[in-house]
């Protein structure tokens, strides 16, 4: 999970609510402090520590700053074997489809399956820069962005390939 906060405005109650939900998921979390180039963003980055997800990774998705550090943090959170070169000896997880095509039993033991795309959730409150971050990661203007909150109203799935690894953001 890429947990995106707006470093410029600091933490808001929604950030803390989202953090509780993400924490209960038990998934690896990378805390992303977007808009880190803004004046006063340092205070918001320090405040982000309160969420308990470790050191926030400062990025400016709009300007493409900090993306190499974000990549390194994702690799550290998931492990090199899952992000760079899959181990051919890994067992493939068998899961039952519940609601959607890629939603599996949350209580089942999760084993890495390199035949399916790696799924990364990007969560955060409105106008934290989630769509801008996804656009920066994939290198194209795929999602609508703008200064007003709520442009992206529904969850959007973006298929992406990085170093021959299929990823679903």
Image (cartoon, rainbow, N blue to C red):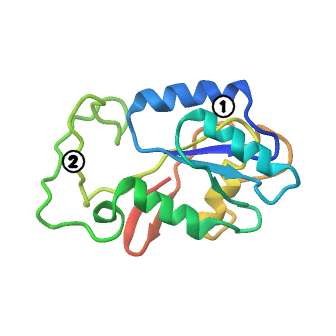
Q: Is residue 87 toward the left or the right of residue 159 in the image?
A: left
Q: Secondary structure at mark 1?
A: helix
Label 2 element class: loop
Q: Nearer the viewer, residue 42 or 101?
A: 42
Among the 4 quarters of the image, the one containing residue 10: top right
Find residue 111 and name its label. Answer: 2
Residue 57: image location, x then y, percent: 61, 55
Which is more foreground, mark 1 or mark 2?
A: 1
Q: Which residue is mark 1?
A: 15
* Vertical relation: 157 (above or below) 51: below
Visible residue check, residue 138: no
Along the line of sight, the residue nearer the viewer: 154 or 1? 1
Can residue 105 be seen here? The reply is: yes
> Is 92 placed above or below 87 here?
above
Quarter of the view holding residue 133: bottom right
Which residue is rendered at x = 59% and y = 34% of the image?
Answer: 51
Residue 80 at x, y percent in the picture: 33, 65
Residue 92 location, x and y as percent? Answer: 16, 52
Q: CA distance from mark 1 to mark 2?
A: 29 Å
Residue displayed at 63% across by 45% down: 4
**Residue 100, quarter of picture:** top left
**Is 136 displayed left or right of 146 in the figure?**
left
Q: How many marks?
A: 2
5 displayed left or right of 93: right
At label 1, counting other C-alpha atoms closer than 10 Å, the crowd grade (few under 14, some 14-19, many 20 or more) is many
């Amino acid at each position: 999970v890429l947990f995106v906060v707006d470093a410029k405005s600091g933490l808001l109650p929604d950030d803390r609510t989202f953090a509780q939900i993400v924490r209960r998921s038990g998934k690896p979390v990378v805390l992303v402090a977007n808009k880190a180039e803004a004046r006063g963003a340092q205070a918001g980055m320090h405040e982000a520590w309160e969420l308990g997800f470790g050191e926030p990774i400062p990025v400016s998705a709009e300007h493409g700053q900090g993306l190499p550090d974000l990549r390194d943090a994702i690799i550290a959170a998931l492990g090199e074997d899952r992000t760079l070169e899959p181990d051919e000896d890994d067992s493939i997880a068998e899961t039952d489809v519940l609601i959607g095509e890629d939603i599996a039993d949350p209580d089942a033991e999760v084993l890495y399956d390199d035949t399916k795309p790696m799924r990364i959730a990007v969560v955060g409150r409105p106008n934290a820069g989630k769509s801008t971050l996804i656009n920066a990661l994939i290198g194209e203007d795929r999602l609508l962005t703008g200064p007003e909150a709520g442009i992206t109203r529904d969850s959007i799935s973006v298929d992406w390939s990085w170093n021959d690894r299929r990823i679903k953001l």
